[in-house]
Image (cartoon, rainbow, N blue to C red):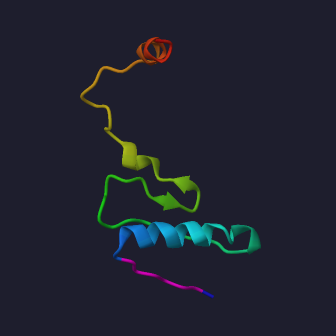
Amino acid sequence: MTITLNIHNEQLFDKILWLLNRFKNDGLEIITSKKEQDKSTPTLTQNGLDLSSFSGMWKEREISQESIREKAWK
């Protein structure tokens, strides 16, 4: 059985998705869920987060593991 929902209210979308996630252990499978309005928000896929949404996120910044560690210990 399949159900398709089109929800225009973001808060309602988040609440319904939260509720549906509680039934995963009972056999519910969420095939896909995405927020159409905000393309920069990573979408949930069958295997977790869609990491391609983060592509180019830091392209204008000079970031290294060392600089992150330095800031983390301050």
Would residue 32 appear left or right of 58 to someone viewing this image? right
Q: Say above or below: 35 vs 61.
A: below
Image coordinates for residue 22, horizontal then vertical, percent: 66, 68
> At x 41% / y 48%, what residue is drawn?
52
Image coordinates for residue 51, horizontal then vertical, percent: 45, 47
Looking at the image, which is closer to me, 1 or 74? 74
> At x 28% / y 25%, what residue is drawn?
61
Direction right: furthest residue: 26
Look at the image and tell me whether residue 33 can be seen.
no
Image coordinates for residue 9, horizontal then vertical, percent: 35, 73
Range drawn in magenta: 2-7
Q: Say above or below: 58 vs 4.
A: above
> At x 38% / y 43%, what residue is drawn?
54
Question: Is 3 colored magenta in this rendering?
Answer: yes
Question: Is 24 colored magenta in this rendering?
Answer: no
Looking at the image, which is closer to me, 48 or 37? 37
Image coordinates for residue 14, horizontal then vertical, percent: 47, 66
